[in-house]
Amino acid sequence: MKARITFFIVMICTLQTFAQDMYLQCGEIFDSESGTFLTERTIVVSGNKIKSIEKGFVSGKDMDNIVDLQSKTVLPGFIDMHVHIEGESSPSQYLDRFTKNDVDVAFQSTVYAKRTLMAGFTTVRDLGGSGVNIALGKAISKGIVIGPRIFTAGKAIATTGGHADPTNGVRKELMHDPGPKEGVVNSPEDARKAVRQRYKNGADVIKITATGGVMSVAKNGQNPQFTAAELKAIVETAKDYGMLTAAHAHGDEGMRRAIVAGIQTIEHGTLMEESTMELMIQYNTYLVPTISAGKAAAAMADIPNFLPAVVAKKAKEIGPISEKNFKRAYEKGVPIAFGTDAGVSPHGDNGKEFTYMHEAGMPVVLALQSAMTAPAKLLGMDKELGILKAGYLADIVAVDENPVNNVRTLESVSFVMKEGKVYKE
Ligand SMILES: [Zn+2]
């Protein structure tokens, strides 16, 4: 008996002593804090964290793993602040809600999650689906499904007939009167209940549709859809429960109301006036530009019968101006956090947003930081994510070229590690 106990103690000590560290020998690494590139560094990864970053190419003991990234540029895993991981645009998307069960959605969402991670996005914020997104986030964090870390909104909150009313456009027997539980509110009391219900469901983020939107079967793509009192109730309750807040907004008035109510991010921000940009700077509200969605919506509108006529009309009007609006907001000094609205655009193409941001005039280094340090801070994860630094989670990606020389290299990452585990090499 004694001998057996001794054997186990020796085994445990041996395992601890020889726990393998990984040595990522990197041609250059991006320091997202300073916005500079450092040449010839070795990132030592132990368990799910970065243990240290050493100068030059170093290696450990015999048992340790060496990963040769000497010809690569290595960066912190990218963060996309606006995706819809459950689905993707298709000519059948408006029919899908009548034909697909949650399990169907769940299976397809695992494919999109994997694509997103393989594109170098190790963290995403899911801004609205049916609630499958909550289960998917849990399955990924348990290691059952491969995908990015997900901060999720569950089902978005709207008003009756608003952009995220799930019964828009359906025939009258199906058009019941959804309430706070389904994310439709019509008073400050409803608004509080809807937030608390999302907390109960396991959401991390409150997403509201502050104005009309492009992809819903409704006429107006930009009118304000919440009263100031409803917005105040939402933001206050979300704060009480420690939840983040995000507002979809195309029109200026709805945006203004959301900013003044204390919303943390404005999604799209398409028709933002100059004075609203100043308000965002004053309130430190971030713009999540989603240029990818604008381009994707405009392209879909040109394909006959892809979108319902009422949607195609809005997509043609609003889609093409998103890049121009981003340029104006960036030049004005509005804080920017990276986001694509993937789901409207294809999952896995998230990296194209870097190219669009750069084409609109943003230096590559700032676009990178908008997908690293800025979102980490918004997510309350700035001591764990967004920087290659000792003690941070080992979310690490590599690309073939320095992105400052060729921004498009970010569209095809060649190495992906999440929490110390290699998913793409
Ligand atoms: Zn969206």
Image (tube, rainbow, N blue to C red):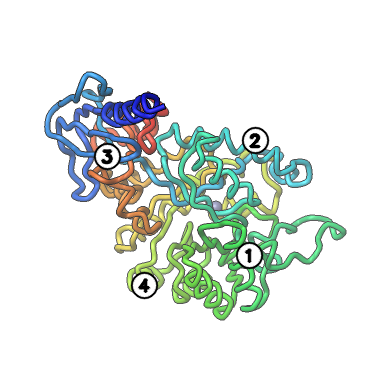
The x and y percentages for residue 263 are 46, 69
The tag earlier along the polypeptide, 2 or 3, is 3
Residue 50, numbered circle: 3
Which residue is labeled 4 in the image? 283
Q: Is residue 60 above or below residue 211?
A: above
- State which quadrant residue 66 falls in: top left
Residue 96, numbered circle: none
The tag earlier along the polypeptide, 2 or 4, is 2
Q: Quadrant of the C terminus?
A: top left
Mark pair 4, 3: CA separation: 34 Å
Q: Is residue 221 above or below residue 235?
A: above
User: Is 285 in front, or is 415?
Assistant: 415
Which residue is labeled 2 in the image? 107
User: Is 56 in front, or is 272?
Assistant: 56
Q: Under tag 1, what secondary structure?
A: helix
Q: Amino acid at mark 1?
A: Gln
Label 2 CA crowd tier, 10 Å (few <14, some 14–19, many 20+): few
Mark 4 or 3: in front is 3
The tag earlier along the polypeptide, 1 or 3, is 3
Which residue is labeled 1 in the image? 197
Q: Under tag 3, what secondary structure?
A: strand
